[in-house]
Image (spheres, rainbow, N blue to C red):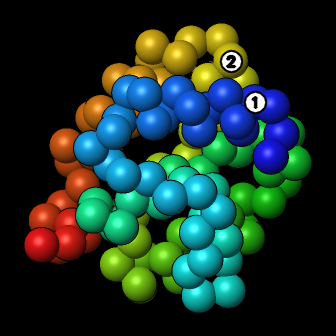
C-alpha cells in the first residue's frame, strides 16, 4: 500500500470506527480501496493515476451501484491539503447514504 493510502487507512479507522471498514475488498470484478459492509459504502482514494479514467470510474460506480454499493471518491490531493474538509465530506456522505444501501 502506498504511504498516502496507508495514512488514509489509519486516519479512516481513527475517525470512523463505526464504519468497520475493510481494505482491498473484492466486489464483482473490482477491488475496493475501503469498504464498509454495514453501510454498503465504498471509499476510493483517487490519486494521479485516476486522471483521464472518468469513463472507467463511472462504469465501475454504476456496476457497484447495481450491487447496492454507494461510492465516495476522495482525491489524494484533497486529503493531503485539507483532511478536515475530507472528514466533513465523509461524515455528510455517510449520513446521506440512503437506507436502501445500508444493511440491516
Label 1 or label 2, whichever lies nearer to me, is 1
Q: Judge left or right: residue 95 versus residue 65.
A: left
Q: Is residue 24 visible?
A: yes
Expressed as whole percent of the image width and height from the top left, the position of residue 57 reads: 67, 64
Element type at mark 2: helix
**Pointer 1 residue:** 4
In the rendered image, residue 13, in percent from the top left (x then y), is placed at 45, 36
Residue drawn at x 75%, y 30% as measured from the top left: 4
Evaluate if marks 1 and 2 touch, with contact meaning CB atoms under 8 Å apart: yes
- Quarter location, residue 32: bottom right
Q: Earlier in the sequence, mark 1 or mark 2?
A: 1
Label ID, residue 80? 2
Provide residue 5's location: percent of width, then percent of height.
71, 38
Q: Position of residue 23 (x, y in %)?
A: 59, 57
The residue that appears at 30% across and 33% down in the rendered structure is 91
In the rendered view, does 22 fall on the left or right side of 96? Answer: right
Badge 1 element: helix
Quarter of the image where the C terminus is located: bottom left
As drawn, 55 above or below 86: below
Q: Residue at image x 20%, y 72%?
A: 103
Residue nearer the viewer, 28 or 58: 28
Taking the spot 43% from the left edge, 28% from the top edge, the residue there is 14
Number of marks drawn: 2
Q: Name the quadrant containing residue 82.
A: top right
Q: How far is mark 1 from mark 2, CA to CA?
A: 8 Å
Crowd class of label 1 (few under 14; some 14 to 19; many from 20; radius 10 Å): some
Amino acid at each position: 500500500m502506498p504511504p498516502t493510502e496507508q495514512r488514509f487507512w489509519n486516519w479512516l479507522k481513527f475517525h470512523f470506527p463505526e464504519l468497520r471498514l475493510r481494505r482491498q475488498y473484492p466486489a464483482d470484478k473490482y477491488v475496493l480501496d475501503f469498504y464498509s459492509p454495514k453501510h454498503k459504502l465504498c471509499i476510493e482514494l483517487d490519486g494521479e493515476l485516476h486522471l483521464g479514467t472518468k469513463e472507467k470510474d463511472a462504469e465501475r460506480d454504476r456496476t457497484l451501484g447495481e450491487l447496492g454499493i454507494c461510492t465516495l471518491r476522495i482525491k489524494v490531493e484533497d486529503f493531503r491539503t485539507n483532511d478536515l474538509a475530507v472528514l466533513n465530506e465523509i461524515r455528510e456522505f455517510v449520513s446521506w447514504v440512503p437506507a436502501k444501501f445500508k444493511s440491516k
